[in-house]
Amino acid sequence: MLLVGGQGTRLRPLTINTPKPMLPVAGVPFTVHQITRARDAGVTRIVLATSYKAEVFREFIDDADLGIEVVIATEDEPLGTGGAIRHALPHLDSGPDDPVLVFNGDVLSGVDIDGLVRHHRDTGSDVTLYLTPVDDPRAYGLVPTDQSGRVTAFLEKPKTAEEIVTHNINAGCYVFTRRVIDRIPAGRPVSVERETFPGLLAEGALVTGVVDSGYWLDLGTPLAFVQGSCDLVLGSAPSPAVPSVGDFLTLSGAQIASDAQVHGGTVVGRDSVIGAGAIVNGAVVFDGARIADGAHVENSIVGVGAVIGVGSVVRGAVIGDGAVIGRGNELLDGARVWPGAQIADGSIRFSSDA
Ligand code: GDD
Ligand code: MG
């Protein structure tokens, strides 16, 4: 199961029209990287648990040939992570003692999927969680374990310093024994992190963790989204679905001026144009966008058909689909421009000499 029903709020405005897992990352919708990794690990059937913008997934899956059966389950109202898993249950054809893999739909990782399932079977766990160490765990679910690897608590998004009892976090991939899913209440929102896992621990279920310190990234924020895309292009993040690994990736019909500098794992989308002398470093340029002469785009996302004017600087920003940034603007650290917005020439400048 792939949980792909969230609203992707932190990636607005990109997620206004496109759900987060369908945003293009290194040339294909993000979800394709996860689906093909699961396929290559031996998974033969995937249930996409959708809610927000479910039709976008349906249209894509109808036409895609991913070499694996993909079934779509859609919640009428978002049911949360646990509710989504329970809602998708009738689409499983596994037996009650079979392992079911569940992935958050926005995580890029090199986890050994097969190894996780093996661990689950070998330990006879009710649930096995993939854990990863991070420097700052506050935005995640904290998962302390004892010496045997048994999970002792699950602390989702801790608020106080005392709650930071480990740096190992829930990396967003689980193996459930199917009968555990049968017991998640149906027909109402359930958070697997705040309700199901703490409940299982309270009743003494065997929940184990597998710590893996390989590549891991949650693409939920603009900077992480850009980083994930660049890491895939540069080859430092694993995926069978990257068209070609290199310093940058150009998709069909893209035009790059001969003296433009494009690097850092940048993706230049289909039919996009990069003008003379432009510098594009570590960026995601969606299809049909135009970066004019002498513009400088770094660590940013440029939406479908958006225009960055002559000499403008865009760094650490998100430019919505169809937005037009006039010449000589500076959009820095965290700036977000809504789809279709127009910014007049020279009207936004942040530099100290402005
Ligand atoms: N179908 C469905 N329905 N999917 C949902 C729903 C829903 O109502 N709500 C969220 N999802 C999906 C999202 O699309 C995403 O793929 C996944 O569930 C997790 O939601 P996020 O919104 O990305 O959660 P998070 O990043 O804040 O935290 C989660 O992931 C962290 C690791 O990246 C938690 O699982 C944390 O414990 C974990 O550390
Ligand atoms: Mg997330």
Image (tube, rainbow, N blue to C red):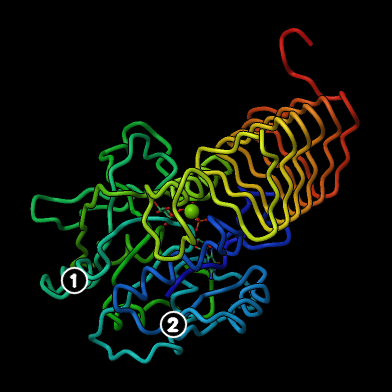
Q: Residue at x 57, y 73 (%)?
A: 50
The image quadrant where one finds the C terminus is top right
Q: Residue at x 60, y 64 (%)?
A: 22
Residue type beneath disc 2: Gly
Residue wearing tag 2: 67
Q: As rendered, which of 182 and 332 lies closer to the eye?
A: 332
Residue type beneath disc 1: His
Residue wearing tag 1: 120
Q: Residue furthest right?
A: 344
Vertical position of residue 82 compared to residue 279: above or below: below
Secondary structure type for disc 2? loop
The image quadrant where one finds the N terminus is bottom left
In the rendered image, residue 197, in percent from the top left (x then y), is placed at 33, 63
Give the spatial CA distance, label 2 vs label 1. 26 Å
* Mark 1 closeness class: few <14, some 14–19, many ≥20 residues within 10 Å: many
Closest to the camera, between mark 2 and mark 1, is 2
Vertical position of residue 126 compared to residue 145: above or below: below
In the rendered image, residue 227, in percent from the top left (x then y), is placed at 49, 43
Secondary structure type for disc 1? helix
In the rendered image, residue 60, in percent from the top left (x then y), is placed at 62, 76
Q: Quadrant of residue 63?
A: bottom right
